[in-house]
Image (cartoon, grey):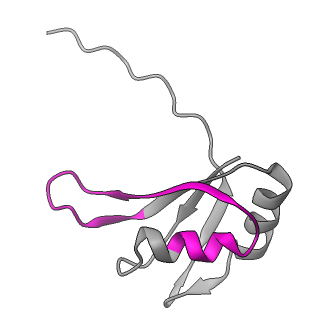
Amino acid sequence: MNIYVGNLSYRMNNEDLEELFAKFGAVKSCKIINDRDTGRSKGFAFVEMDVDSEGQSAIDELNGKEIEGRTLKVNEARPRPPRERRTY
């Protein structure tokens, strides 16, 4: 299950995020999205968990929970829409 995590504290790193989700089951991967130019966190991430029921438990428990002064928005990630091809 791929999980979207929004409204993250800018101080949180991948290890902190993985530790938070590992309480609910095995974390396959986690990636905080960084700005390409500044390298600073954009305040959201994606966490992938192998077992859907564990992922759903994490969503249920963490959505709306305050972590480091920020209220998390946690839900199942939607597939990325196809990008339009640019013509020059």
Write the start and end of the magenta stretch as one range.
17-43
Query: Which part of the image, by quadrant, shows the C terminus?
Result: top left
Q: Where residue 26 sits: x, y (%)? A: 70, 61
Q: Is residue 29 magenta?
A: yes
Q: Where residue 27 sits: x, y (%)? A: 64, 59
Q: Residue at x 49, y 89 (%)?
A: 68
Q: Nearer the viewer, residue 56 or 18?
A: 18
User: Can you say whether 14 is above or below 84 in the image?
Assistant: below
Q: In which image quadrant can residue 78 be found?
A: top right
User: Can you say whether 79 is above or below 44 in the image?
Assistant: above
User: Can you say whether 9 is above or below 22 in the image?
Assistant: below
Q: Residue at x 35, y 77 (%)?
A: 10
Q: Residue at x 37, y 18 (%)?
A: 84
Q: Where residue 16 sits: x, y (%)? A: 49, 77
Residue at the extreme right of the image, as rendered: 53
- Horizontally, residue 17 falls left or right of residue 1, namely left
